[in-house]
C-alpha cells in the first residue's frame, strides 16, 4: 500500500493543489519526476489551483505555499549542480580517451543530487498532506486517475 501511495500522492497533490491553468497547460512537468522541479512564477505567485474545489482556507494555502518555497530553495541549487555535472561529464565523454573512473564518479554525484531532490520532495509531500483535512485529502486522492 505504501509503495503505491507516494506516486499517487505526488500526482494528486500537484494536480489538485499547485497546478494553475497557465502552468499546467504550458508545461509537461506535472507528470515528470521530482528533479524536474515544479517551479515558475505561476506555481507560487498566482493563486493555488483548485483551492475552491478542495475547500482550502487561506491559512492552508499559505502553509502549502511556504512548503513549496522551502522545497524550491533546497532543490534549485541541486538542480544547478546536476546541470554542471552533466556538462562536465559530456566534456569528458567527447574526448577520445577519457578516464572511466572520472565518468563513474560524476554519475554517482548526479545520482546523489537527484536522490537529495527526491528526498526533499517526499518531505514536502508529507508535510503538505498534513495540511489537508481528511475530507480534502480523500477528495484530492479521488482526483487522481488511478485511484479507485
Image (spheres, rainbow, N blue to C red):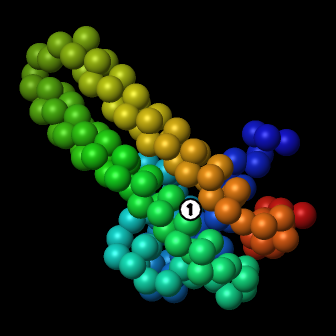
Residue 88 placement (x, y as % from top left): 16, 33
For label 1, the residue is 31
Q: Is residue 128 above or below residue 92?
A: below
Residue depicted at x 72% and y 66%: 132
Specify whether 15 is left or right of 121: right
Specify whether 52 is left or right of 98: right
Q: Is residue 26 above or below residue 72?
A: below
Under circle 1, the secondary element is: helix
Residue depicted at x 52% and y 48%: 121
Q: Does any portion of residue 111 appear in the rendered image?
A: yes
Residue depicted at x 35% and y 53%: 73
| Number of residue marks | 1
Specify whether 85 is left or right of 129: left
Question: Which quadrant would residue 10 be assigned to in this image?
Answer: bottom right
Query: Where is the N terminus found, in terms of image quarters?
Result: top right
Residue 147 placement (x, y as % from top left): 83, 62
Question: Which quadrant would residue 93 be assigned to in this image?
Answer: top left
Residue 98 placement (x, y as % from top left): 15, 17
Direction front: furthest residue: 59
Residue depicted at x 52% and y 38%: 119
Specify whether 143 is left or right of 65: right
Amino acid at each position: 500500500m505504501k509503495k503505491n501511495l507516494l506516486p499517487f500522492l505526488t500526482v494528486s497533490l500537484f494536480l489538485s493543489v499547485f497546478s494553475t491553468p497557465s502552468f499546467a497547460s504550458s508545461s509537461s512537468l506535472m507528470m515528470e519526476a521530482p528533479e524536474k522541479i515544479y517551479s515558475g512564477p505561476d506555481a507560487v505567485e498566482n493563486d493555488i489551483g483548485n483551492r475552491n474545489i478542495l475547500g482550502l482556507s487561506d491559512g492552508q494555502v499559505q502553509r502549502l505555499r511556504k512548503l513549496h518555497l522551502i522545497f524550491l530553495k533546497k532543490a534549485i541549487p541541486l538542480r544547478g549542480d546536476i546541470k554542471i555535472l552533466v556538462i562536465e561529464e559530456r566534456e569528458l565523454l567527447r574526448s577520445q580517451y577519457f578516464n572511466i573512473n572520472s565518468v563513474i564518479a560524476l554519475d554517482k554525484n548526479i545520482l546523489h543530487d537527484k536522490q537529495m531532490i527526491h528526498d526533499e520532495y517526499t518531505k514536502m509531500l508529507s508535510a503538505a498532506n498534513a495540511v489537508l483535512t481528511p475530507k480534502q485529502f480523500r477528495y484530492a486522492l479521488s482526483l487522481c486517475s488511478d485511484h479507485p
